[in-house]
Image: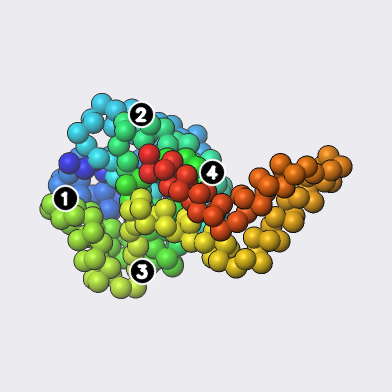
Amino acid sequence: MYKFYILQSLKPEESYLGKQVFNNIKDLAPSYFCEIQNEKNLFDTLELIRQDLMINLSKQGIIHIHCHGNENGIVLYENSSIQKLINWSDIRPYFRNIYISTSKRTIISVCSCEGFNAGRLVAHFEPCPFDYVTGSMKEVGFEDSVNGYTYFYKSLISGKTVREGTIETTAKFIDMDFVCLNSIQLFKAACEELMKFSSFPGNLKQKREVMKQKIINDFGYINEKQKNIIDQGYSEEGVKTYIERYKEIFLS
């Protein structure tokens, strides 16, 4: 069974959006709503969610944040007027703590323009705290932000799988450009840029030379053992080893 945590931080004229999603599902499944007023309020609320999920281990948390945001983080409207950007890196530890405390991955939805940037909440070489991450790849209209997510959540409440709900929501709300990736898909996306980089041998060779020169600059010389470590690390085989180790930790 799911429990929905609907958080929002919006301009006064938009303040009905997240609340409307909450109102649409509150009688169908356990749900909680919070108007986020500032950074401390956000972090305190995420801590309360952690504590609540520890008590209710039978439930999987769906954390929905209705806000504005970009590739760097989410925007909070402190006291409904003052904007403050909260970086993904500052939010990340709270979601990791939820996972560590409950041993259950949450579903995170960031309903904002280009909300799928929430994928940046996933850190390299740390366990992925999310079962799924949902969002949009572009600017989302007000109606779609409410109706699209309401439709998606109602499909989950009705017993449909996340994949089924995603397919139906994507088809019904085409302009929303809805995306929902699981932890395996997130891992592949995280590795994509690295794989692109390593597919060109010249890139690895250049990186090897840069690292060797850095050691020479810092210490005045480089020995054979250090050269061998760098040559191995920045080779196609070294990249494969790196990714396998990354995957092991990511999915742990």
- Where disc 2 sits, the SS reads helix
Say which quadrant the C terminus sits in. top left
| x and y percentages locating residue 140 in the rendered image | 39, 66
Q: Amino acid at mark 2?
A: Ser
Which of pointers 2 and 1 indicates the residue nearer the eye?
A: 2
Q: Which residue is mark 4?
A: 89
**What residue sits 38% from the left and 44% below the top?**
251
Q: Amino acid at mark 1?
A: Ile
Q: Which residue is mark 3?
A: 177
In three-dimensional space, the C-alpha distance between marks 1 and 3, rounded to whole angstroms, equals 22 Å
In three-dimensional space, the C-alpha distance between marks 2 and 3, rounded to whole angstroms, equals 33 Å
Q: Which residue is mark 2?
A: 101
**What residue sits 25% from the left and 40% below the top?**
60
Q: Which residue is mark 1?
A: 157
Query: Splitting the image into 4 quarters, where does residue 201 fall?
Result: bottom right
Which residue is situated farthest in the right direction here?
Answer: 220
Please tell me which of labels 2 and 1 falls first in the chain: 2
| x and y percentages locating residue 4 in the rendered image | 26, 43
Local packing at callout 1 (Cα closer than 10 Å; few below 14, some 14-19, many 20+) is some
Q: Relative to residue 110, is residue 98 depicted above or below?
A: above
Q: Is residue 122 visible?
A: no
Of residue 127 and residue 222, the one placed in the foreground of this image is: 222
Q: Are marks 4 and 1 in contact (CB under 8 Å)?
A: no
Of residue 137 and residue 23, the one placed in the foreground of this image is: 137
Local packing at callout 2 (Cα closer than 10 Å; few below 14, some 14-19, many 20+) is few
In three-dimensional space, the C-alpha distance between marks 2 and 1, rounded to whole angstroms, equals 25 Å
| x and y percentages locating residue 145 in the rendered image | 33, 61
